[in-house]
Amino acid sequence: LVILLDSKAQQTELEWISYPPNGWEEISGLDENYTPIRTYQVCQVMEPNQNNWLRTNWIEKGNAQRIFVELKFTLRDCNSLPGVVGTCKETFNLYYQETDSEVGRSLRENQYVKIDTIAADESFTQGDLGERKMKLNTEVRIIGPLSRRGFYLAFQDVGACIALVSVKVYYKKCWSIIENLATFPDTVTGSEFSSLVEVEGACVSDAEEEADNSPKMHCSAEGEWLVPIGKCICKAGFHQKGDACEPCGRGFYKSSSQDLQCSRCPAHSFNDREGSWRCDCDDGYYRALSDPPSVACTTPSQVSEVIKEKVQQRSIQLSWQEPQQPNGVITEYEIKYYEKDQKDRVYSTVRSKSTSATVNNLKPSTAYVFQIRAFTEAGYGTFGPRLEITTQEEATAAIVSSEQNPVIIIAVVAVAGTIILVFMVFGFIIGRRYALAGPIGLSAPVSLLKFPGTKTYIDPETYEDPNRAVHQFAKELDASCIKIERVIGAGEFGEVCSGRLKLPGKRDMSVAIKTLKVGYTEKQRRDFLCEASVMGQFDHPNVVHLEGVVTRGKPVMIVIEYMENGSLDGFLRKHDGQFTVIQLVGMLRGIAAGMRYLSDMGYVHRDLAARNILVNSNLVCKVSDFGLSRVIDDDPEAVYTTTGGKIPVRWTAPEAIQYRKFTSASDVWSYGVVMWEVMSYGERPYWDMSNQDVIKAIEEGYRLPAPMDCPPGLHQLMLDCWQKDRAERPKFDQIVSILDKMIRNPNTLKTPVGTCTRPISPLLDQSTPDFTAFRSVGEWLEAIKMERYRDNFTAAGYGSLESVARMSIE
Ligand code: AMP
């Protein structure tokens, strides 16, 4: 309440105007609590036609529109007064007059507006006065809406006996409050009882209005705040504490007004001021411009997998992989190098905009140490691992030099000859030892010996001209040698057909022909031929063989050996339960051998899965689906992960999912999954679990259980491939030899007694057309590229195809 007039609060005389002079009279008295008060009384009950006026002083109303007038009075009961019938009254009238300022002391009745006739609820008699217990009446009247600056109240007595004990004039307002971080000012209520006054709130300091939701409240006629709408929120760098916004402490930040709390600075960042909206990166750590402040600062990822492309006497050519998680766009690489044996290391640097560089002006026969780092908008990354390379000897130069010293030439030739001889003899001995190792010495002995200069895989992307890469690794075929017969599938770039290839002077052969659809873009052509550039580098019985390409005619084609049984997953599902364990292990052995070859060449497959293995009519499995890492994008199993890029989650090692660490060891993990697919005849790994659940389960140590009928030794091998620590996983050459041992000792492939097994209906028993196509064991062995075991089969009593068909594990 805002009080405009309270007669009781005034100790001095009120000095209101009374007219006529013998009417209302100001009298001092005591209230019920013995507090001195000022009252006005009138009691002209004997005389008729009374008209006594009393007017207050001018009351300035301020903003108020609706004024409350509270009157406390006592009134004498006319019945208790003898001889007053007809003249005594028991009511009085209340009036007001609005003015903008004080007017004179004269009273003009007609300028007053009547508010009401006031009657007493209780009146008192003579005897009551002695008790000092007044029968006090309280009446409240409301006036308004008022429009002038102030007003007077007037009381008209028409012959009653009244004592006006107190007159209180007030209005109501809603007092300033803070609600939802907005301040609402003192607000005077509306003029009408039913009106609400809408008030806009102002945000407290360091707060701002929530978008499209500005704060509002409503002040009711009773002076209460009602219906808050909208709100303010603490600005970035500030958080709410009670009705205020306080700055985030040091080491904390709040990046947006939308966040509720201040958060601790993310890893490798700091701030030393209060009220921060973000934290700064520690020295040497960075964030990309596009990174939100919640992202930890990191060092740009290192450049790794540096390959020496060409080592000469005075120059070295290097290439490397782009870091897998660069901190923004890489604009440049810096190659730092120094002479290894130099005492005071003097670094030199070379810069390159691509992922290769040639360092010139080196000394011959000198060991150099190289390190490479990437430069992004976030600054320099850390240097990658040190790579030591020794330049070529000058001796070679001597041979071609003009001096042509015969002594040096003889010495060099003699040394080189001795080296070659030593390798040949050594290779022969080792080769023989392996060849004699077992009755079915399945391992390829010579490939175990790695001569220096083993062929390595070259990423076709490193070629500036992709056409050159294709023709470096693939034979250009004449379109007239190719006969397309029918469409067998749909590839990413166009139809896959089967047909025949007849090269001059060679037997015609079945081939698969991948075509590039018309209307291709240059990039599509490049990506399409990229698979040929990769496949053309491989030559292994368990890797799909490229026959050649047609790039000079249309359609552009890739011609591959024909794999009659299509992809392994579908093939296994079609023949569920129809193979012996030995046959299944034979398939696995083939895939492992193909992968051993690829990993030896330094090729990381990244998408090894049964769907990417092709099977020919002799059940020989071959690794297929090559290309660049982005080829995975076309795999329907590949899904986007949080680390970016598409990944076939169920087949991929955790480190490759988490930080794109694809290596031969991650291929080994995938190989373990392929083993599981094969032993379960094409069951989907992790069944219908979601990818997210698979990632979680693997992280928590869960591994796929042994498929039905799977020999424990094979499941153990799968578990080894699924070691969390990739260094603990077996290498492909170890996998091949383990499988070879199993094939040589079929006892190891027995399922333990008591295990529930499925009835086997071996494929060989079903007189399949594939098997009956052979006339002898020798022909069959030749077809499956195992002809060198012909003698082993004869010695073991498997002379006829029939006896081979009946061959059981025992
Ligand atoms: P791709 O584009 O390599 O995934 O091939 C599409 C489909 O064509 C595959 O799923 C196979 O069924 C089939 N296919 C691809 N290459 C061959 C091949 N060399 N022999 C037989 N079928 C193949």
Image (tube, rainbow, N blue to C red):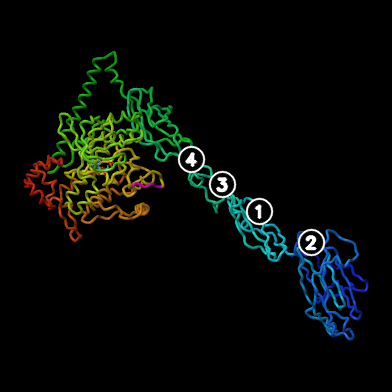
Near mark 1 (Cα within 10 A), the count class, few <14, some 14-19 or many ≥20, is many
Query: Would you say residue 753 sits in the magenta stretch?
Result: no
Distance (Cα) linking label 3 and label 4: 17 Å
| Quadrant assignment, res 496 | top left
Label 2, secondary structure: give it.
loop
Task: Kindly indicate whether the residue at mark 4 contacts the one at mark 1 (C-beta within 8 angstroms).
Answer: no
Q: Which of marks 1 and 2 is nearer the N terminus?
A: 2
Q: Where is residue 211 in the image (x, y as percent from the top left)?
A: 58, 51
Distance (Cα) linking label 2 and label 4: 64 Å
Amino acid type at circle 1 is Ala
Read off the magenta span. Answer: 637-641
Of the two numbered discs 3 and 1 in the rendering, the one whose residue sits closer to the viewer:
1
| Quadrant assignment, res 146 | bottom right
Residue that carries the numbered disc 2 in the rendered image: 61
| Residue 375 seen in render | yes
Q: Which of marks 1 and 4 is nearer the N terminus?
A: 1
Near mark 3 (Cα within 10 A), the count class, few <14, some 14-19 or many ≥20, is many
Residue that carries the numbered disc 3 in the rendered image: 277
Label 1, secondary structure: give it.
strand
| Residue 344 seen in render | no
Task: Kindly indicate whether the residue at mark 3 contacts the one at mark 2 (C-beta within 8 angstroms).
Answer: no
| Quadrant assignment, res 95 | bottom right
Label 3, secondary structure: give it.
loop
Q: Where is residue 484 in the image (x, y as percent from the top left)?
A: 22, 37
Near mark 2 (Cα within 10 A), the count class, few <14, some 14-19 or many ≥20, is many
In the image: residue 620, left or right of residue 636: left
Amino acid type at circle 4 is Ala
Of the two numbered discs 2 and 3 in the rendering, the one whose residue sits closer to the viewer:
2
Residue that carries the numbered disc 4 in the rendered image: 288
Task: Kindly indicate whether the residue at mark 4 contacts the one at mark 2 (C-beta within 8 angstroms).
Answer: no
Task: Kindly indicate whether the residue at mark 4 contacts the one at mark 3 (C-beta within 8 angstroms).
Answer: no
